[in-house]
Amino acid sequence: MKRSKRFVAASKHVDISRVYEIDEGLKVLKETDSPKFDETVELAVKLGIDPKRPDQALRGSVALPKGIGKEKRVICFAEGKEAELAREAGAVEVGGAELAKKVSDGWLDFDVAIATPGSMKFVGKLGRVLGPQGKMPTPKSGTVTNEVGQAVADFRAGKIEYRSHGPNVQIPVGKKSFPESDLKENILAFMEHVNAVKPAAVKGHYILKTVVSATMSPGIQVNLN
């Protein structure tokens, strides 16, 4: 694969044979040359799970203490009092059957969809539309709930959904402009969460490898065990 001149230059800062301590790794990340936009910083975690076993798959949501530097557009499938609470919390669209039809017709200008359990009768028909987008509401991810006001507020502020793909989980943990201390706090908070949701069926080593990177920068392996 041909790499850009910027990527090649940034790679000179990174010793790929090393596993950095978190503070040093983030310092190296911040020192790499940046493009003209504020890059997203991501954390990739390789887990000792068997991806062929459903009871070892990870899926959920977590609110990072320093946010991720982006306010998300949230819609909510709700009616009555819950619909009013969702609007007050900042949902960009709220409704039941009419909102489901709008989405079914191809409108997908939002990041997160939240639904009350009672509204799943409308949402259940949208699996083919929302599923491939990763936007289908589910109880496990915290997007099917009766507490829609709180859920809308949390996801707007940057609460993130995650799921394992094979043995890996990858999430945004902030922007490159964030102070190193904020990135570290977000990373450690997510790692604490990942350890807390370790599937009971997993045996042996659970956290195998952790790598931080920015949008246009090489990965930096860090020690988070």
Image (cartoon, rainbow, N blue to C red):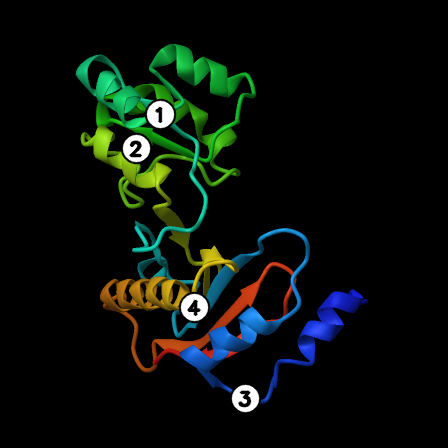
Q: Which badge, 1 or 2, is on the more N-terminal residue?
A: 1
Query: Which secondary structure lies at badge 2?
Result: helix
Numbered badge on residue 18: 3
The one of 73 and 32 positioned closer to us in this rendering: 32
For the residues labelled 1 and 4, the Cα–Cα distance comes to 31 Å
54 relative to 17 in the view: left or right: left
> Would you say the residues marked 1 and 2 are in contact, meaning their CB atoms lie under 8 Å apart?
yes
The one of 4 and 101 positioned closer to us in this rendering: 4
For the residues labelled 4 and 2, the Cα–Cα distance comes to 28 Å
Q: Nearer the viewer, mark 1 or mark 4?
A: 4
Q: Nearer the viewer, mark 4 or mark 2?
A: 4
Q: Which badge, 4 or 2, is on the more N-terminal residue?
A: 2
Residue 222 appears at what percent x and percent y?
Answer: 46, 79
Is residue 167 shown above or below 39? below
Residue of label 4: 180
211 relative to 59 in the view: left or right: right
Examine the rendering and report whether any part of residue 172 can be seen.
no
